[in-house]
Amino acid sequence: MGRVIAVANQKGGVGKTTTAINLASSFAAAEVNTLLVDCDPQSNASSGLGLVKDPERISTYHLLMGAASAEEALKTTVLKQLWIIPAHKNLIGANIELVDGERREFRLKDALAPIRDRYQFVVLDCPPALDLLTLNALVAADAVLIPMQAEYFALEGISELLDTVERIRASFNPDLAIEGVVLTMFDDRTNLAQQVTAELKRYFGDKLCATTIPRNIRLAEAPSHGKAALSYDIKSRGAESYMNLAKEIIGHQLSVKEMAAAAAARSSQRTVAVNEPVASAPTVVSEATSATIDQPPSEEPSQAPTAEIRAEDPVQASSTEAPVDEIRVKQPADALVEARVEEIQSEQPAEEAGPAPVEEIRSEEGAGDPPAEMDKSA
Ligand SMILES: Nc1ncnc2c1ncn2[C@@H]1O[C@H](COP(=O)(O)OP(=O)(O)OP(=O)(O)O)[C@@H](O)[C@H]1O
Ligand SMILES: [Mg+2]
């Protein structure tokens, strides 16, 4: 099942749309099928990927109102493995029209359900508000990615977003995770940026993405050409930084798989443990066994503390190590992205930053199959 990532921050102008467009494009450049869903009435993600305004176009509005299916709303883009469901300014009306609607918080999730398996990533670009549109995105999402600027008051307003995430977990979407916090328009030469980063690191820990997005003119110019930065100028720092962010997030995905593999490994151990007689074990071991789902197959009393540690933090279990290495060997995310980027770079003449790379990427069509039953008409 693909991962649905909502790019959200109720603060305006922090780089949500720039992140949504360029992250989705970088996933697609890494040859994973990706869908970008524009959930913002401003429709900047749609125009930023070159879709002209068209009042007749089926959009996220129709999905939320139950007037069209996601299949009908899909549009192709210049990148072979990137699709988009565009927005329209009438989407603002959905906030009001859905006030008494049935399952109003689940409209987007329900609409995307029939197609989400076709994509490894679905990226949702949210509006700058904690309204019903953002709520729908957070209910549909597996995780939220929060773009932030490294400003003095950076943490102000974030608590409101994190409270919203908590409330959504408590009511509509218990599994909603924080994918990460990514610093945008970042200038690491200033002391302020470094101080704010240190504070954010203390606050968010490893949820603060290692990749930062620099302030880069190419990122600001690209949407006016209807292109992601990697189609506009693949050698720019902006394009490069979003490709790094994509790598980092693909890496998180592998971590999820690692945990799943570890859980599978532990459950096979459990089968062994069930077959082992535990009656002779000392009381403390028996308690640990019944209190956890994670009993290692051992008759030695000295194993009991290990069982308890594992129960508290399954990620640290030593049984994860073998599957992790295996998966890393099988799926080197960095190599996957880098290979593709090198390919695109070698296709792109160094002096050109115009349409040529896009044409060339397009001309590769046919090299891979589109997802099943995909409407390729733009
Ligand atoms: N890293 C960057 N370097 C330079 N300019 C950037 C960068 N990121 C975003 N911008 C510019 O900053 C402005 C705001 O960015 P963007 O539209 O992505 O923010 P947003 O959070 O989606 O805004 P809104 O809240 O209105 O939806 C845009 O003009 C964009 O081109
Ligand atoms: Mg935006």
Image (cartoon, rainbow, N blue to C red):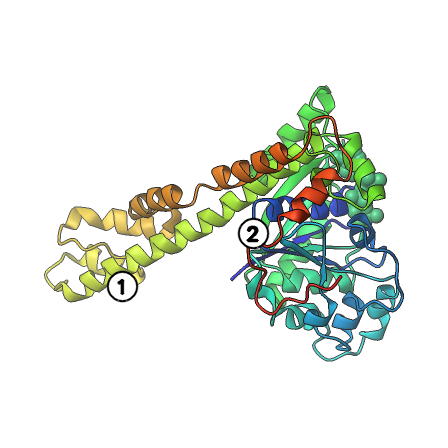
The answer to whether residue 243 is above or below residue 320 is above
| Foreground pick, 345 / 155 | 345
The answer to whether residue 193 is above or below residue 298 is above
Mark 2 secondary-structure assignment: loop
Residue 7 showing in the rendered view: yes
From the Cβ of disc 1, is ligand 1 less than 8 Å away? no
Counting from the top left corner in percent of width and height, residue 5 is at 62, 54
Residue occupied by mark 2: 367
Name which quarter of the figure residue 201 lies in: top right
Counting from the top left corner in percent of width and height, residue 244 is at 59, 36
Mark nearer the N terminus (2 vs 1): 1
Residue occupied by mark 1: 290
The residue shown at (76%, 59%) is: 39
Counting from the top left corner in percent of width and height, residue 309 is at 32, 48
The numbered mark at residue 363 is none
Among all residues in the image, which is located at the extreme left? 280
| Foreground pick, 363 / 36 | 363
Left or right: residue 59 versus residue 363 is: right
Counting from the top left corner in percent of width and height, residue 251 is at 50, 43
The residue shown at (81%, 46%) is: 226
Q: Which amino acid does label 2 sit on?
A: Ala
Left or right: residue 87 versus residue 257 is: right
